[in-house]
Amino acid sequence: MIDITDTYKSVIDMNTAYTNSLLKDGHDKYYEPREFVYQFGTVNINVGRQVGTSTFIMRQATENDLILVPTEQVEEMYAESEALVVCSENMALLRKTIESKVFEKIYVDSPAYCHPVIKGMALELIKKHTQQIIMLGMH
């Protein structure tokens, strides 16, 4: 199996460095946090199935992050993650989450299989310019 970890990390780190440079240059004056993250701080990568995407997310996500997954079965797979893991079909818990915490990174595992409004819900979670949305897998 090919290890996709370095590739994912490189792209996410590049995006973090890029958005930090934009913020340093004062771009936060021109964009509200949601618009800034939508335009500059969202990473979308799909390199096919069964390449280690879920494993990467599980290893990288911290207690300051949120992982959105498509099904309860996938949610169970993330049982040992430090991050809060929410099945995209559990919109009640997701809405409660929106009001309660600011996450550094919002990972979406296989966005194509998540509830259709999940991308909008991820954007609703953005409250700071420094947050990131990371969508990995089928789009």
Image (spheres, rainbow, N blue to C red):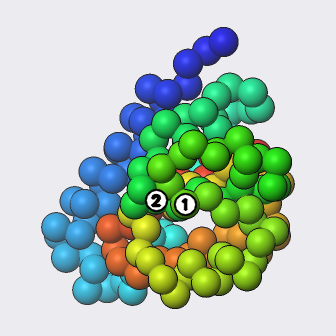
Circle 1/circle 2 CB separation < 8 Å: yes
Percent coordinates x, y for residue 104 in the rendering: 39, 63
The residue shown at (27%, 51%) is 17
The residue shown at (75%, 27%) is 50
Mark number, residue 60:
none
Question: Mark 1: which secondary structure?
Answer: strand
Front position among marks 1 and 2? 1
Residue 88 placement: quadrant: bottom right
Along the viewing direction, whichever of 60 and 92 lies nearer the viewer: 92
The residue shown at (55%, 82%) is 98
Q: Is residue 92 left or right of residue 133?
A: right
Q: Is residue 8 left or right of residue 53?
A: left
The residue shown at (64%, 38%) is 54
Mark 2 = which residue?
65
Is residue 130 visible in this depiction of the protein? yes
Q: CA distance from mark 1 to mark 2?
A: 7 Å
Question: Mark 2: which secondary structure?
Answer: loop
Q: Earlier in the sequence, mark 1 or mark 2?
A: 2
Q: Is residue 101 left or right of residue 90?
A: left
Position of the N terminus, as image quadrant, is top right
Percent coordinates x, y for residue 18 in the rendering: 30, 54
Residue 69 placement: quadrant: bottom right
Q: Residue type at mark 1?
A: Leu
Along the viewing direction, whichever of 21 and 96 lies nearer the viewer: 96
Percent coordinates x, y for residue 107 in the rendering: 56, 55
The answer to whether residue 16 is above or below residue 97 is above
Mark 1 = which residue?
84
